[in-house]
């Protein structure tokens, strides 16, 4: 539950209302005396955790309802976001490496090995 300046949070019974200003200050607007700002902040933290946990469970349900292709697309987007933007230096290095390998193949200076053979060797090595 993200709250920015000027938004209000109202507890389920409707008794507690917190208003957050742009500076992050919390003002109590409550009819009963004797409740400190610290207590309000503790309640707010508990309500926030509850709301976040609930939101995640709802999101999980929505994701499970997606088709396989939609799940794959969502996963790709999230992984790209977590990885961040690609490093131009790394991209340039891989481009240079792939071009070098392509030139070696074209010139006949290297011998290509079929993927089936490579994977068979890897499987054999892993089984040791």
Image (cartoon, grey):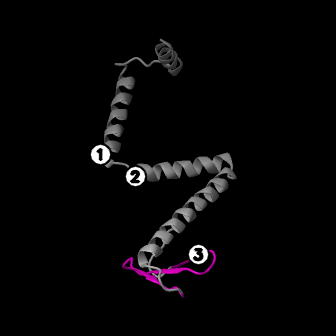
The reply to whether callout 2 and callout 3 are in contact (CB within 8 Å) is no
Q: What element carries label 2?
A: loop
Which residue corresponds to the image point at 57% horizontal and 59% vertical from the top-left?
53
Q: Which of marks 2 and 3 is nearer the N terminus?
A: 3
Which residue corresponds to the image point at 53% horizontal and 48% vertical from the top-left?
76
With 74 as the anchor, is 80 left or right in this view? Answer: left
Badge 3 crowding class, 10 Å Cα cut-off, few under 14, some 14 to 19, many 20 or more, is few
Q: Earlier in the sequence, mark 1 or mark 3?
A: 3
**Is 14 covered by the magenta stretch?**
yes
Which residue corresponds to the image point at 46% horizontal and 69% vertical from the top-left?
42
Of residues 116 and 62, the one nearer the viewer is 62
* Residue 51 rendering spot, x and y as whole percentages: 57, 65
* Residue designated by label 3: 11
With 94 as the anchor, is 117 left or right in this view? Answer: right
The residues colored magenta run 8-31
* Residue designated by label 1: 89
Q: Outermost residue, bottom direction?
A: 31
Q: Earlier in the sequence, mark 1 or mark 2?
A: 2
Badge 2 crowding class, 10 Å Cα cut-off, few under 14, some 14 to 19, many 20 or more, is few
Residue 4 against residue 68 in the figure, above or below: below
Q: Which of marks 2 and 3 is in front?
A: 3
Q: Distance between the residues labelled 1 and 3?
A: 51 Å
Q: Is mark 3 on a helix, strand or loop?
A: loop
With 89 as the anchor, is 105 left or right in this view? Answer: right
Q: Nearer the viewer, mark 1 or mark 2?
A: 2
* Residue designated by label 2: 84
């Amino acid at each position: 539950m993200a709250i920015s300046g000027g938004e209000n949070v109202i507890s389920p019974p409707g008794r507690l209302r917190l208003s957050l200003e742009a500076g992050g200050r919390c003002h109590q607007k409550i009819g009963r005396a004797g409740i400190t700002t610290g207590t309000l902040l503790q309640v707010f933290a508990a309500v926030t955790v509850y709301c976040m946990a609930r939101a995640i469970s709802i999101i999980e349900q929505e994701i499970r309802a997606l088709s396989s292709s939609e799940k794959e697309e969502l996963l790709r987007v999230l992984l790209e976001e977590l990885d961040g933007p690609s490093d131009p230096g790394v991209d340039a290095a891989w481009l240079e490496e792939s071009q070098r390998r392509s030139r070696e193949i074209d010139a006949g200076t290297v011998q290509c090995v079929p993927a089936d053979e490579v994977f068979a060797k890897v499987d054999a090595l892993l089984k040791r």
